[in-house]
Image (spheres, rainbow, N blue to C red):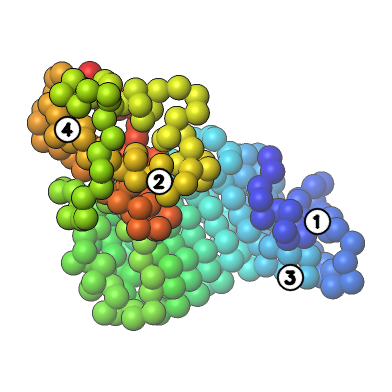
């Protein structure tokens, strides 16, 4: 399986008990003990990969996120037998707090991916001793402020991702007080109310009095080369972005065929907020608009 960074770095894949590097004048050989090779074999049998970060180093990158197998807790302990593991990717695996206890002593670890896993606050207590940790991804987990408290002593931690977790602003602020250099990414959250702004002309069908949600959405979303498609593909012009923004302002004032009023208000507020960012030249609006313009999710509730 190809990964973008594999084209930018000279990496070694494990094969038959030896590492083979691309030709380089800075090539650095790595030899494994029988115990270490046995651990590598078990990781590979589970579908994991052990890679050299670069041929000029003896540091390792261990990936379980591509395995697609269950029982990660039972094999994760093999990582402790390997020398100089600096990166560990467990994203999307079935790793639990029990499994995290197995990696508590990885003193060289700088990057740890735990996004979309079952780890909880209790599991993060096992990270207290990872003094070299610089990057931690907790996106899509059940981690709360209590879990973030376990990270206060990790002074080298520079990047933390908690989007769609249970962490709150209070917990994040407490972490920042303990570590002023940390960057915490909470992701983008739609506001409950559309932002106040200068009014943009609202395009509607030929007869404004006949405007409906369906007619406006036909203008904005229907077809292969829609305004929405062009905006998301960065092929639109500023006038089209304003036009799409106007469409969303218009439908927010109309009543859907069915569904809860609060739900409709929240969904249209997200559309307006995302295009508001784009009108102001902020490309964060693209990610927000892609999430907010999920037609299927809206239709299932309101159409």
- The residue depicted at 27 percent of the width and 24 percent of the height is 206
Distance between the alpha carbons at the discs numbered 4 and 1 = 57 Å
Secondary structure beneath label 2:
helix
Residue highlighted by disc 3 = 57
Residue underneath mark 4? 264
Discs 4, 1 touching: Cβ within 8 Å: no
Give the foreground label among 4 and 3: 4
Residue at image x 59%, y 66%? 86
Mark 1 closeness class: few <14, some 14–19, many ≥20 residues within 10 Å = some
- Say which quadrant the N terminus sits in: top right
As drawn, the residue found furthest toward the front would be 206
Residue at 55% of width from left, 57% of height from top?
88
Identify the mark nearer the N-term, 4 or 1. Answer: 1
Residue 82 placed where, x, y %? 64, 61
First along the sequence among labels 4 and 3: 3
Q: Among all residues in the image, which is located at the extreme left?
A: 261
The residue wearing badge 1 is 19
Marks 2 and 4: which is nearer the front?
2
Q: Quadrant of residue 100?
A: bottom left
| Label pair 1/3, CB-CB below 8 angstroms | no
Q: Position of 198 compared to 23: left or right? A: left
Residue 52 appears left or right of 72:
right
Left or right of 205, for residue 136: right
Q: Distance of mark 4 from mark 3, alpha carbons?
A: 54 Å
User: Which of 96 and 176 lies nearest the eye of the viewer?
Assistant: 176
The residue at which mark 2 appears reads as 239
Dot 4, how many residues are within 10 Å of its Cα: few (below 14), some (14-19), or many (20+)? Answer: many
């Amino acid at each position: 399986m190809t990964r973008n960074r594999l084209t930018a770095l000279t990496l070694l894949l494990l094969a038959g008990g030896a590492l083979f590097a691309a030709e380089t004048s800075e090539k650095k050989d790595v030899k494994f003990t029988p115990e270490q090779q046995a651990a590598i074999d078990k990781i590979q049998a589970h579908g994991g990969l052990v890679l050299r970060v670069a041929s000029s180093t003896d540091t390792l990158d261990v990936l379980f996120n591509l395995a697609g197998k269950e029982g990660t807790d039972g094999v994760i302990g093999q990582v402790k037998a390997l020398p100089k593991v600096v990166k560990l990717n467990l994203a999307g695996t079935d790793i639990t707090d029990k499994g995290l206890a197995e990696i508590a002593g990885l003193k060289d670890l700088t990057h740890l991916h735990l996004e979309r896993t079952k780890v909880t606050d209790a599991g993060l207590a096992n990270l207290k001793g990872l003094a070299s940790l610089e990057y931690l991804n907790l996106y899509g987990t059940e981690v709360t402020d209590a879990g973030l408290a376990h990270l206060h002593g990790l002074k080298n931690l520079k990047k933390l991702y908690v989007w769609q977790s249970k962490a709150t602003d209070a917990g994040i602020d407490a972490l920042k007080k303990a570590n002023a250099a940390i960057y915490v990414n909470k992701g983008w959250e739609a506001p409950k109310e559309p932002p106040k702004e200068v009014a943009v002309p609202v395009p509607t069908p030929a007869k404004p009095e006949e405007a409906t949600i369906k007619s406006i959405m036909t203008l904005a979303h229907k077809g292969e080369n829609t305004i929405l498609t062009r905006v998301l593909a960065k092929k639109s012009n500023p006038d089209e972005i304003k036009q799409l923004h106007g469409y969303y302002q218009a439908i927010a004032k109309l009543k859907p065929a069915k569904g809860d009023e609060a739900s409709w208000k929240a969904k249209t507020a997200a559309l307006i907020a995302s295009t508001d960012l784009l009108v102001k030249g902020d490309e964060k609006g693209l990610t927000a608009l892609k999430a907010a313009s999920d037609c299927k999710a809206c239709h299932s509730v309101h159409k």
